Each structure stands twice: as C-alpha cells, then as structure tokens.
Image: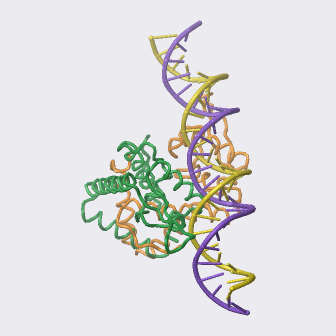
Chain colours: A orange, B green, C purple, D yellow
Amino acid sequence: MSRLPPPALIGALLRVPSQAIHRRLIAELNAAGFRDLRLPHIAVFSYPSPDGARPGDLAERAGMSKQAMNQLLQSLEQLGYLRRIADEADARARIVRLTRRGQAVWDEEFRVLEQIEQEWRATLGEKSFEQLKRLLQKAWASDAVP
Amino acid sequence: MSRLPPPALIGALLRVPSQAIHRRLIAELNAAGFRDLRLPHIAVFSYPSPDGARPGDLAERAGMSKQAMNQLLQSLEQLGYLRRIADEADARARIVRLTRRGQAVWDEEFRVLEQIEQEWRATLGEKSFEQLKRLLQKAWASDAVP
DNA sequence: TCCTGTGGTAAACTCCGTTTACTGTAGCGA
DNA sequence: TCGCTACAGTAAACGGAGTTTACCACAGGA
C-alpha cells in the first residue's frame, strides 16, 4: 500500500494503528497454531480474561448483542477453546470457563501484545511510550470515551 | 455500560476510543440529516477527500477489495452523495465526484471530528494533546504500523 | 401465587466483504 | 501493426457476522 502522509485528526491517528494491531494479533494467533480462530473471536479473548465471566457481561464489554456474543461462544465451544457451565448460584446464568487450549490462546495473545508494546517502546523511547499510555488512559477515564 | 479499569496494554488503549469515535461520527452524521448513511460508508468519506479519486485507490486506502469499495460507491451514488464520471485521460478509469450533498457530508464530518478534538483538548490540555498526536504520528511513520 | 425483570437461547433476516469470473482499455514489444 | 500482458472496473455467487424478533426458564418481590 502506498503510504499516505499522516493525517492531523485524532480519529485516524487512533484507528489506523488499532486496526493494524488487530490484524497482526489474529495473524500471529493463527501462525501459533490456532488456525481456526477468526477475527471476531478476539472480541471474546479480550481484556480482562473471559474465564469466569457470564455471556451477557462479555457481550456488554464487547459492545455487541447477547445473541451475537452467544454465537461466538458457541463456535469457540465447538472448537474446544471454552465451555459454558452452569452457575450454581443462579440457575438462569452460565459461566464461561476456558479450556487448557483456551488458556493457551490467552497466554499467546498476551505474549504478542507485549511484543507489540516492545516495538512501540523501541520506536518512541521508554519515557514517551509511557506518557502515550498515560494520556490515553486519562482520555479513557474522562467522558471523551463514552 | 459498567466502566472497567483502564487496561495496561496499548492495543485496547487505542481500540476503545477509536471505536467510540467511529460510532459517534456515524451517529452525528445521521442526526445531522444524513439518515441513509451507514457505518461502512465512512470508509469512503475518509481522509483525504474522495473527490477526484479513483475507485481502486479508495479501495486501497480503505484496505478493502475493489469490489467491496465499488458496492459502497454504487450505494452512495444511488443515495445522491457522489457520481462516478469517466476519466478522459484513461478510458478504463473512473473518477469519483462528490455532489453538493456529498460535500456537505464531508464538511459535517470534519466539523464533528474537530469537535471531538476540542473535547480531547479540554480533557488533556493543549500541550498534552499535541504531544499525544505527535507520538501517534511518529508511531505511524515507523514500521510499528505496517 | 402471580408477575415482572433478568439471563440465555434460537431462528430468520440483513448487511457487507471476499472470491471468482468477466469486459474493455492501455501500453509495450516483436 | 499485431498481439500479449497488465490494469481498471464490474457483476454475481457465496459466506460470515451481527441484529431483530421471539421465546423459555428462573429469580425475586408484591
């Protein structure tokens, strides 16, 4: 792709690297042996760990409907990455439990993300990178991110 | 949505505000009277202006196939936001031209994005915001964003 | 014991992007 | 000039992904 000059607006400045990281993550997970994982599955394997969570909460975190999340969970269950067990405290509810393979995905994902962080550190320098993260966290904490 | 503690990893720190901006943009465009615009259409109305560009280039910029971009352009043409005229210099090619209404979308989008920037400025302070953008541009320019 | 709200599920539908395949033109080399 | 290859765009079939609509089962209080 022919590289365009960096735009001035914050929207694109956030979007482009975010998409790049997303694509790289799924590519590296595939390369690490999790061939049957596809892009939307990442919505499940997202901070914090889905282990112990309820489907409805995962849907809310991911910003999608309960039904859509349930389809993802169903597919991941068939692929052997997790199980949905009954919640003993509430017979209506279920709880997501990662299998050993699912936990391996979580670990690998964390490894890749740390690798990416290392690269950003190398590019920006330790201090600048930390400040970048601090600024983004501050924006997150405010109402700028609804 | 119950607010989670800000995560430590750069991936999510970029993704979440980016998605929030995206959703807000399409919502405000709809509210501004462009009711028939939907989320994927934003891929066309993206920096720099699609006016004068060729479909293939727009596809490349957006990171999608020519066919997918063409569907978007076709739909936007039916809705009256643009036209695809012949390129006199190359009989194979076409050129996208925004209609008056399409230009209005572009203007409104820019207005919204500037409004969002104002809010970030207010949250982070002028200096910090400028540095945030500078750091993101630096990361963009490097190989951290492939 | 109702009755309302909650958690989850199921199926139909819609949107959207890719894959596959094709048309017509540009541009180069023989 | 002819012919071949590359390029720009288009069309249709396909598949995946999420929403809408509808439903069931249980919780918890009136």
The image position of residue B143, as x and y in percent, is 49, 75
- The answer to whether residue A32 of the structure is visible from this angle is no
Q: Nearer the viewer, residue B86 or B30?
A: B86
Quarter assignment of residue C12: top right
Is residue A80 left or right of C17 when viewed as pictured? right
Q: What residue appears at the point 27 percent right and 56 percent down from the top-left corner?
A: B118
B120 lies above or below A57: below
Q: What residue appears at the point 37 percent right and 46 percent down from the top-left corner?
A: B28
Q: What residue appears at the point 51 percent right and 68 percent down from the top-left corner?
A: B57
A16 lies above or below A49: below
The image position of residue B3, as x and y in percent, is 42, 44
Quarter assignment of residue A22: bottom right
A145 lies above or below B121: above
The image position of residue A6, as x and y in percent, is 40, 71
Q: Nearer the viewer, residue A127 or B73?
A: B73
B34 lies above or below B91: above
Q: Nearer the viewer, residue A32 or A13?
A: A13
Is residue B12 left or right of A10 when viewed as pictured? right
The image position of residue C11, as x and y in percent, is 70, 32
